[in-house]
Image (tube, helix red, strand yellow):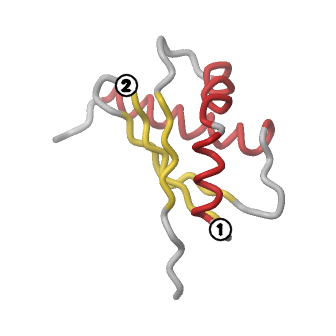
Amino acid sequence: MKKGHKAEKVNSAIKKALSEIFIYDMPLKDNLLTIVRVETSPDLSKADVYITALRDVEDLSDELNRKKGYIGHLLGERIKIRKIPDLRFIPIPQTTI
C-alpha cells in the first residue's frame, strides 16, 4: 500500500525533530544514535522509530522507550501537529562486515 504525501511529510518531520532532540536536548553520552526511519500508523496515533547505535542498541532502545513520554513532550514543542503520536523505539542491530 502506497503511503500518502501527508504521512511521508509527518514521518520526515518527526525524524528531523527527534534528531535535533537527541543532539540538543538529550545528548547521549558515549554513544552515537542514528534514526534510520520513522513509520506512523495511518491515523497518526502511533509512530515506530527504528534506531541503530554505535553500541548497546537494545539497552538504548529500552531507555528511550522508558522516556518516551518526555521525548513526546519535547517533540510536541518542535513540530506542530494536532496530536503527537505514541512513540515506540525499535532497535536495529548492527551487522558486522
| Residue on which disc 1 sits | 56
Q: Nearer the viewer, mark 1 or mark 2?
A: 1
- Specify the amino acid type for callout 2: Leu
Near-viewer residue (61 or 39): 61
Rendering quarter of residue 10: top left
Residue 85 horizontal side relative to residue 56, left or right:
left
Residue 70 horizontal side relative to residue 61, left or right:
right
Q: Which mark is residue 21?
A: none
| Residue on which disc 2 sits | 44
Compared with residue 80, is residue 91 higher up or lower down, i.e. above or below? below
Mark 2: give few (<14), some (14-19) or many (20+) Cα within 10 Å.
some
Q: Position of residue 68 (x, y in %)?
A: 60, 35
Farthest residue, direction left = 1
Mark 1 or 2 closer to N-term?
2
**Residue at 80% across, 39% down:** 24
Farthest residue, direction bottom = 97
Instruction: Give the CA distance from mark 1 to mark 2.
Output: 29 Å
Report helix, strand or loop for mark 1: loop
Compared with residue 84, is residue 68 higher up or lower down, i.e. above or below? below
